[in-house]
């Protein structure tokens, strides 16, 4: 993920196989979609064991967006 996120961004394991990324500076939906696609590409790479076996896994992604400071959105409009 370090290849995709900036130093000011935050990623953490919140339990088991669940992670959260807090990303600042997402300009719009298109920019967010491109960022998520790059993140998916990075974590989709198989892991190769010392024996040469490739391991992969299923992924489920959920994205939520909050408005910029000073921007108000009605209920139900902050997550997609």
Image: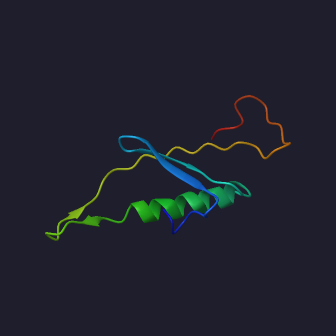
Q: Residue at x 57, y 63 (%)?
A: 5
Q: Position of residue 69 (x, y in %)?
A: 81, 44
Query: Toward which corner of the image does residue 4 lie, by quadrant?
Result: bottom right
Q: Position of residue 73 (x, y in %)?
A: 79, 36
The quadrant of the image that shows the C terminus is top right
Q: Residue furthest top?
A: 75
Q: Position of residue 37 (x, y in %)?
A: 53, 61
Relative height, residue 47 to residue 22 (above, below): below
Q: How is the image coloured?
A: rainbow
**Of residues 64 and 17, the one drawn nearer to the viewer in this rendering:** 17
Q: Residue furthest front?
A: 7
Q: Is residue 71 left or right of residue 61?
A: right
Q: Residue furthest left?
A: 51
Q: Position of residue 22 (x, y in %)?
A: 60, 49
Q: Is residue 63 left or right of residue 55?
A: right
Query: Toward which corner of the image does residue 25 lie, by quadrant?
Result: bottom right
Q: Residue at x 55, y 57 (%)?
A: 36
Q: Residue at x 51, y 65 (%)?
A: 2
Relative height, residue 3 to residue 31 (above, below): below
Q: How many marks?
A: 0
Q: Residue at x 46, y 59 (%)?
A: 40
């Amino acid at each position: 993920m370090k290849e995709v996120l900036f130093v000011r961004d935050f990623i953490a394991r919140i339990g088991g196989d669940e992670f959260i990324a807090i990303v600042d500076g997402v300009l719009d939906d298109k920019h967010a979609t491109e960022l998520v696609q790059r993140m998916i590409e990075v974590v989709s790479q198989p892991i190769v064991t010392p024996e040469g076996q490739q391991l992969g896994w299923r992924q489920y992604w959920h994205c939520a967006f909050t408005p910029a400071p000073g921007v108000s959105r009605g209920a139900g409009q902050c997550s997609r």
